[in-house]
Amino acid sequence: MRMYDLIRKKRDGETLTKEEIEFIIRGYTDESIPDYQMAALAMAIYFRGMDPRETADLTLAMAASGDMVNLSAVEGVKVDKHSTGGVGDTTTLVLAPLVAAAGVPVAKMSGRGLGHTGGTIDKLESIPGFSVELTEEQFVNHVNMIKIALIGQTGDIAPADKKLYALRDVTATVDTIPLIASSIMSKKLAAGADAIVLDVKTGEGAFMKTQEGSFSLAKAMVDIGNQLGRKTVAVISDMNQPLGYAVGNALEVKEAIETLKGAGPADLEELCLELGSQMLILAGKTPTADEAKNLLKELIHAGAGLETFKRFVEAQGGDPTVIDNPDLLPKAQMQVSFLAEEDGFVSYIDAEKVGTSAMMLGAGRERKDSVIDLAVGIVLNKKVGDPVKKGEALAVLHVNNQSRLEEVKALLREAFEISPTPVPKPLLVCGIVT
Ligand code: URA
Ligand code: CA
C-alpha cells in the first residue's frame, strides 16, 4: 500500500477501506508516513468527507494507536461524560459525585491542558491536599468502594490523535465533522468507557456556532459510539453565555458545592440533571429520564451528592472540611466589581471573551508551562435576560495580579451586550441525539 494512492483516492471522493485507514494511522504513528502526506489527506477529508463506517474505523484505529485503559476490574457500567468545551463549565465537578451517589461508577481520567480555566484536576487541586496520584490498584479500589475516583492521565492515550490534532491545527483542517468526531471519540474509547454521554455545546462560545452544525457533530459521534458497541447519547446545550456564574478554579469548586447543596445556579443544575439522567439511563439504573431526574433531585435534596463529594475528596488526600466551609479554598486578594454603564437588560454575554478574561487574570494556561492561579477568576452577577441598572455590578473579578486588570475590563466591556428592551432567557437544552 502507498500513502500516495490513498491520498489520491480520497481526493477523488472514494471511500477508504478499514485496512487502508489502519495502514495510514499505523504509518503516521510510527512516522513512516510524514506530516506533509497526512496534511494532504486531512485536506482531502475536509473537502470529501468520510462516511459513518470510515469515521468509525478511523476512531478505532486512533484509539488503538496507544494504551487502551482496561477498567474491567471496576464493577458496573462505566459511563463517561465529555463536553466539547464550554466556558466556566462546572458540570463534571457536580455530576461525578452526584452520579456516583446514585451508584453509577465514575472512574475518571483527566488531563490538564490549555484553556480558559484549568481542567477538572486543576480545579480539584484547589482543595488543600487533594491529589490525583493514585496507583492503579488504589484507583480501582476507590471506585469499587465509594463509586468515584479521579486519576491524572497516565500512559499514552491515542497518540495518533494527538499528532493529527496538532497537524490539523496548523493546516486549517480542524473544523470538519468526521475529524472532530473521531478525535473526541478515540480518546473516550481508549480511556475505557462502556458508554458515553456527550455535552455538545452550541453557540458563539462553542466550537460549533450553529445548531445545525452541533446536531451534525452530535449525530456523527453517536453513530461512532453505536457502531463500536459503546452506547452513546448527546445533549446539545447552549453556549451563548457562560454556564453558571463562576469561571475560575476554586471559584468553580465553590459553585459545584453550592449546586450539590441545591443552591447553585439554575442553568448549571438544569444541565447537570439532563446529563446525569442520560448517564443513569445508560448505566441501566433508571428506565426514563423523568425517573432519573427525580432520583438525582432526591439525592441533592438528601445531601447524598455532597456526602459522596466529601468522601471522594478525603479518599484522595483533600481536606473535607472545605465542603462545609468553602471559605477555606484559596482566595484572591482583591475583589473588583465590573459595573454596568447603562440601564437595560443583559442580551448577550460572549463566553469566549469572559473565558479569555479569566485566563488573563491567571485562571488558565496560555502556554503549556504556564502556572495557574487557582484563586482568581470571574463571577458573573447577571445572566442573559436579567435587568440591570447603571452602576450595578455585572460581574466581580477575583484578582491577585493587577497588571492586566484594565485590559481585562476592556475585554469584558466587549463581552456584555445590554438591550434597552426586555430579553427572554435563552433555552439551555436544545435537543438530545440518541
Ligand atoms: N476536541 C478534540 O479533542 N478534537 C477535535 O478535533 C476538536 C475538539
Ligand atoms: Ca460555572
Image: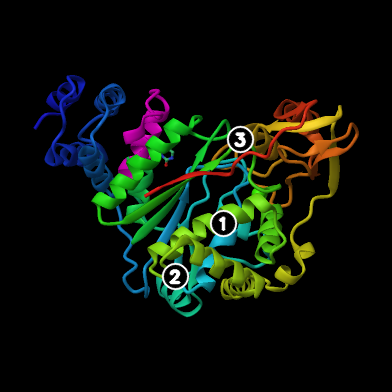
Residue 105's disc number: 2
Please, what is the three-letter code of the amino acid marked with disc 3? Asn
Q: Secondary structure at mark 1?
A: helix
Say whether residue 30 is left or right of residue 123.
Answer: left
Residue denoted by label 1: 272
- Calculate the distance from the C-alpha at mark 1 to the C-alpha at mark 3: 18 Å
Residue that lies at the very extreme toward the left in this rendered image? 1
Please, what is the three-letter code of the amino acid marked with disc 1? Cys
Q: Residues within 10 Å of mark 1 (few under 14, many from 20)?
A: many
Viewer-closest of 392 and 254 = 392
Q: Residues within 10 Å of mark 3 (few under 14, many from 20)?
A: many
On the image, the x and y values in percent for residue 178 come to: 31, 35
Residue denoted by label 3: 240
Q: Residue at 26%, 39% (x, y): give it.
A: 55
* Residue at disc 1, CB closer than 8 Å to ligand 2: no
Mark 3 or mark 2, which is nearer to you? 3
Above or below, 382 relative to 266: above
Q: Is residue 169 shown in magenta?
A: yes
Give whichever of discs 2 and 1 has the lower sequence position: 2
Say whether residue 117 is left or right of residue 23.
Answer: right
Please, what is the three-letter code of the amino acid marked with disc 2? Pro
- Calculate the distance from the C-alpha at mark 3 to the C-alpha at mark 2: 32 Å
Viewer-closest of 328 and 281 = 281
The span picked out in magenta is: 159-181
Give whichever of discs 3 and 2 has the lower sequence position: 2
- Calculate the distance from the C-alpha at mark 2 to the C-alpha at mark 1: 17 Å
Residue 327 sits in which quadrant?
bottom right
Q: Is residue 48 shown in magenta?
A: no
